[in-house]
Amino acid sequence: MSTVIERFQQAKEVWTNKTAINDAIPDGWTKNELFHATLHATNSASSRNIYFTLVPESEDFGNLAVFLSKTNQFYQIEATERGVEITVWLNQDIADNIDEIIEGYKQKSQAFVDKLVEKSDKKHDIIKTIIIEEKIDEVINNAMNQENNRGVYFSIGKTREFAANIPLLMGASGASLIQLSLNKWMTAADQLRAKSPDDPFPQEKIKPLLGDALKWKKFMIDFLDGESW
């Protein structure tokens, strides 16, 4: 059975694709900040992040993320020299909708960027909160791929650590429940890591972890898309 990454590589060869470039970088922003904002705006609780690479904050571009949507389309967000690029790959059944789909991503991205520009004093904390959303996606992908216990443990730990250090987020209604859930899974993953660090994450724990992780992700998305900040 092929992995989801292998399916993506195969799809890139034969599926219809289109790229849109956002080169309108707001004043005081980096391309990588625009990357994070675009990633959040195009993400959803039902989208699965299958690949993610993050460069040091000092670099102006290089971040890359690939998603598989619930409608079986692949899309990629990348910070490049030209700006932030959104590329969509569609199979032939829905290829006629490619212009509509990529335009929808562009509009959602611009709307979120405009919202953040209006509240520029919150930009730092909001970008950090988006990174938590990305860390949750990493937890989900690690669990679904049955990465080793050490890797799952550290991905949960990073998520918990990032969340605990953003006062704007931790002051939101419901944030304490998310922390409790993260703490529960941190303890469980630590026990697995201590006992068998290189073993695959147990099959029987995948579904319950995914159930909670999707709740974490939905909480983050609702917070970022809401008006509480």
Image (spheres, rainbow, N blue to C red):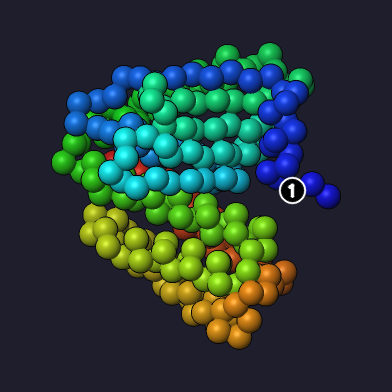
What's the residue at 55%, 25% (across, down)? 87
The mark tally for this picture is 1
Tell which residue pokes out farthest to the bottom in this image: 195
What's the residue at 75%, 23% (across, down)? 14
The kind of residue tagged 1 is Thr
The spot of residue 53 in percent (x, y) is: 48, 46
The spot of residue 2 in percent (x, y) is: 79, 46
Image-based side of 187 in relation to 37, left or right: right
* Position of 142 relative to 109 (above/below): below
* Crowd around label 1: few <14 · some 14–19 · many ≥20 (10 Å): few
Image-based side of 84 in relation to 59, left or right: right
State which quarter of the image contains the C terminus: top left
* Position of 7 relative to 185 (above/below): above
Image-based side of 92 in relation to 116, left or right: right
What's the residue at 57%, 45% (across, down)? 51
Which residue is label 1 attached to? 3
Q: 101 and 149: which one is in front?
A: 149
Q: Residue 80's quadrant in the figure?
A: top left
Q: Circle 1 — which element?
A: loop
